Image (spheres, helix red, strand yellow):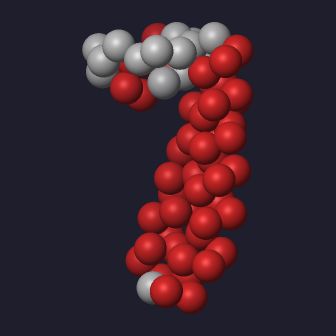
Amino acid sequence: MNPRFAPNIGRTGRLIRASLGVGFLAVAVPAFSFHWLAGAAAVIGGAFCLFEAQRGWCAARACGLKTRW
């Protein structure tokens, strides 16, 4: 495994990121009716949050920021 994507969050952080990912994807549906760029941003954000949850990896923590979970 690439050390850049080594797991750095626990179960609670993974659940929070998975919830955020599902939330972003749910918002993407009505966002497309507002503007295609808003919908695309919500889909990309949701997919990235689900990636973080699946890997157990947090981009903010990888950059050195301290997160609560």
Q: Residue at x 29, y 14 (%)?
A: 64
Residue 13: quarter of image: top right
How many numbered circles does the render carry?
Answer: 0
Q: Quadrant of the N terminus?
A: top right
Q: Give x and y (percent) for residue 47.
A: 60, 50
Where residue 37 sits in the image (x, y, percent)?
Answer: 42, 77
Residue 47 in sight in this render: no
- Residue drawn at x 61%, y 34% as measured from the top left: 17
Question: Residue 32 versus residue 1: which sits nearer the camera?
Answer: 32
Tell me: residue 18, above or below residue 46.
above
Residue shown at 61% from the left, 44% from the top = 20
Task: Choose between 59 and 24: the one closer to the eye.
Answer: 24
Point 65% across, 60% down: residue: 25
As displayed, is residue 27 above or below residue 65? Answer: below
Residue lying furthest front in this view? Answer: 68
Q: Is residue 69 above or below residue 42?
A: above
> Residue 37, can we see it?
yes
